[in-house]
Image: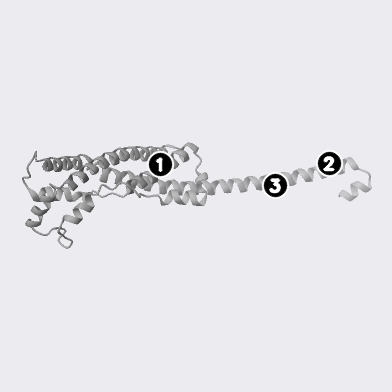
């Protein structure tokens, strides 16, 4: 058709025909790009949804652990340590040695806490570059602050061991099978060690560390809770 138009001297119609072809090609390319962009957008939203779901599970686990192992037993820990210090000073007597020893022993068992919480999803987001797929830039910033603080708290805690666990391990005749002190005599011998200067020192250090960890726990739980609210409330 182009050749016929040129041979018959209908240049104007030829140009219109050529421009029409170009427009059709451009429209086709734009449609293809739009479809591809829409597909990529849908893929990104699916990836975002999967990661947000994973982050939510880990944040719930984190805040629950912080509440259970730091915030909830805080008052009891402080009371036990203060009573232990009073016993060292001679300002109070022990009515039940087994109860006192078992209470102090909690610092070597049920109350031990590791700040290495659930960071797998966030680490994967960073390492794969998928963090940018989360559209809310403010949420990304708060997420980064939360995990940076978590790493910092872990590093500081690792370097600030009070020594109370080492003291208990060194002075307790513990039966791992029975999961308790071996005998009544061992209870009384351990009680005598609570009069040692070393025990007073580790109690003071544990008190200071417990207060510090409690403040961190409140802060980290608040940050984690706010991140959870953002995940739940926004239309992703």
In-image side of 198 versus 21 (left or right):
left
For mark 2, what is the residue?
A: 16
First in sequence: mark 3 vs mark 1: 3
* Residue that badge 1 annotates: 146
- The residue depicted at 50 percent of the width and 46 percent of the height is 131
Check disc 1: other Cα within 10 Å, few if <14, some if 14-19, many if 20+. some
**Residue shown at 8% from the left, 53% from the top:** 188
Spot occupied by residue 222 in the image (x, y as percentages of width and height): 34, 37
Give the mark count: 3
User: How was the colour assigned to the protein in this rendering?
Assistant: one colour
The picture places residue 40, in percent across and down from the top left corner, at: 57, 48
Give me the C-alpha separation between circle 2 and circle 3: 20 Å
Nearer to us in this view, 113 or 24: 113
Q: Residue at x 6, y 42 (%)?
A: 93
Label 2, residues with CA under 10 Å away: few <14, some 14-19, many ≥20: few
Could you tell whether 194 is left or right of 68 in the image? left
């Amino acid at each position: 058709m182009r050749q016929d138009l040129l041979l018959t001297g209908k240049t104007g119609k030829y140009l219109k025909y050529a421009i029409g072809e170009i427009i059709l090609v451009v429209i086709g390319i734009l449609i293809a790009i739009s479809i591809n962009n829409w597909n990529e957008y849908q893929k990104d939203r699916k990836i975002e949804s999967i990661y947000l779901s994973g982050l939510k599970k880990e944040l719930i686990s984190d805040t629950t652990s912080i509440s259970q192992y730091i915030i909830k037993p805080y008052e009891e820990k402080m009371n036990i340590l203060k009573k232990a210090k009073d016993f060292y000073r001679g300002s109070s007597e022990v009515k039940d040695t087994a109860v006192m020893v078992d209470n102090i022993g909690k610092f070597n068992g049920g109350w031990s806490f590791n700040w290495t919480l659930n960071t797998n999803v966030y680490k994967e987001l960073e390492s794969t570059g998928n963090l940018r797929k989360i559209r809310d830039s403010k949420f990304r910033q708060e997420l980064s602050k939360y995990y940076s603080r978590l790493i910092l708290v872990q590093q500081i805690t690792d370097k600030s061991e009070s020594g109370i666990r080492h003291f208990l391990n060194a002075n307790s005749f513990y039966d791992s099978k029975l999961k308790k002190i071996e005998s009544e005599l061992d209870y009384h011998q351990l009680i005598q060690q609570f009069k040692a200067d070393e025990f007073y020192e580790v109690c003071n250090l544990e008190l200071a560390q417990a207060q510090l960890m409690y403040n961190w726990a409140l802060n980290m739980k608040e940050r984690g809770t706010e991140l959870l609210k953002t995940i739940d409330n926004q239309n992703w």
